[in-house]
Image: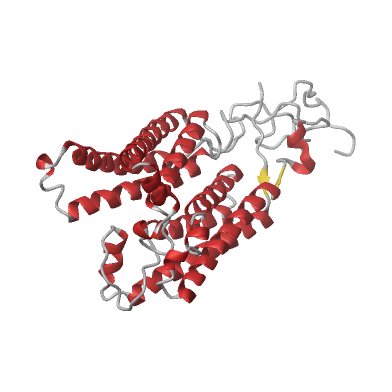
Amino acid sequence: MSTVRDSVLTRGARGLGALICLLLALLSAGWIIRDLTIAQHGADVWWAWLGETPRPREFTAWATSALDPLLVLGALVAAVAALRTAVPSSVATGALLSLATATALLRTPLVWMLGAGWLQGLDSGLTARARLTALTQLALAVALIVVSAAGRRPDGPAGHGARGLPEPASSAYGVVRAVPHHVAPGAPGRPFKGPAVTVAVLLGAAGLAVICWEIRWWAQLGGDIYGKGLFGDASVFRALLQPPVHWQALALALSALAAAAAALRRAAWARPAALTAAALLSVHGAVALAFALRTGELGRFAALPVRAQLEVGTAAFVAAAGLAAVIAAARPGVPAAAPDADEVLAYGAAPGEARPPHAPPPPSTLPPGW
């Protein structure tokens, strides 16, 4: 029987990864606070996140979108997962890498958008600070990837686990342990088959639905206009730290499909990847659904054209599928390996140490001086 070995994220890598997560959270939280300070009413920020355009108190632009509070929450959760030694290394690493990937996907287009000439009407100092924030978060995302890759070592003392050799028993009578502990059916943190299939189906369906709509928009708008919504233009600008609308949709859809593939493989990092992708996709659909409710489209749903009905229905499906995937991915995964309670113990062995096949029986007469 083959055993599944896990590599360990070192204590230093966990601490450094948690620190980077906190820095990412602070950068996004600072811009959320900035939007709250310039809003005429606190609810104006919420309506701006839903796609409306309430005027801020000053002649300026909003900085954040509905995904920014989710990035803050995700960074805090990843920091906690990295600091808790009870969290398996594969899950902690998956949380760090998922946060890094989401940050990179959502911040990359800001590098060229915030340096474009069509933003000259805004305060140059404001756009420069927003661009610096995007560049800093991209650098921190790369640092998370490096820490996750370089901060791992083989499991087991002195690398025994990496070579598959049995570890010596400390108290068996005159022998070493030759029978390994009972091993769970997979690496610690790996999703069970039922939740994994559920997550894969939900994320796969939601991601494909979003991609189908993006193909529909490309065919309807044409390559030039669609390209402006993909790479950024003044006509689609909403907030300083919000990626272009079509870029955001495609990035979230591809993330969902990648997480669905990982869930099908039942990879050890599939659960944090699915949680990240599902949460972002759910908020993406919920924002579109809330905007339809605000504009009254849901109240007159039966009177809408078929295309509008499909669009609202897709938003509702994406929001519901993302939420259901979050619930399924949050279920506990495979526990860490535990010793078999029914195994036979060698003479003098502690509980959890299996009796080797060649272990001698207890002596009938104790040795002199015993």
Query: Which quadrant holds the C terminus?
Result: top right
Position of residue 184 relative to residue 239, above or below, is above
The total number of labels drawn is 0
Q: Position of residue 300 (x, y in %)?
A: 10, 46
- Left or right: residue 100 versus residue 312 is right
Residue at the spot 62% in from the left edge and 54% down from the top edge: 142
Q: Position of residue 106 (x, y in %)?
A: 47, 53
Residue at the spot 48% in from the left edge and 40% down from the top edge: 271
- Left or right: residue 205 versus residue 165 is left
Q: Position of residue 21 (x, y in %)?
A: 55, 59
Is 278 in front, or is 11?
278
Position of residue 11 relative to residue 160, above or below, is below
- Left or right: residue 93 versus residue 297 is right
State the image quarter where residue 198 is shown: top left
Residue furthest out toward the bottom: 58
Position of residue 142 relative to residue 32, above or below, is above
Is 85 in front, or is 37?
37
Query: Which quadrant holds the N terminus?
Result: top right
- Left or right: residue 370 versus residue 44 is right
Residue at the spot 47% in from the left edge and 74% down from the top edge: 124
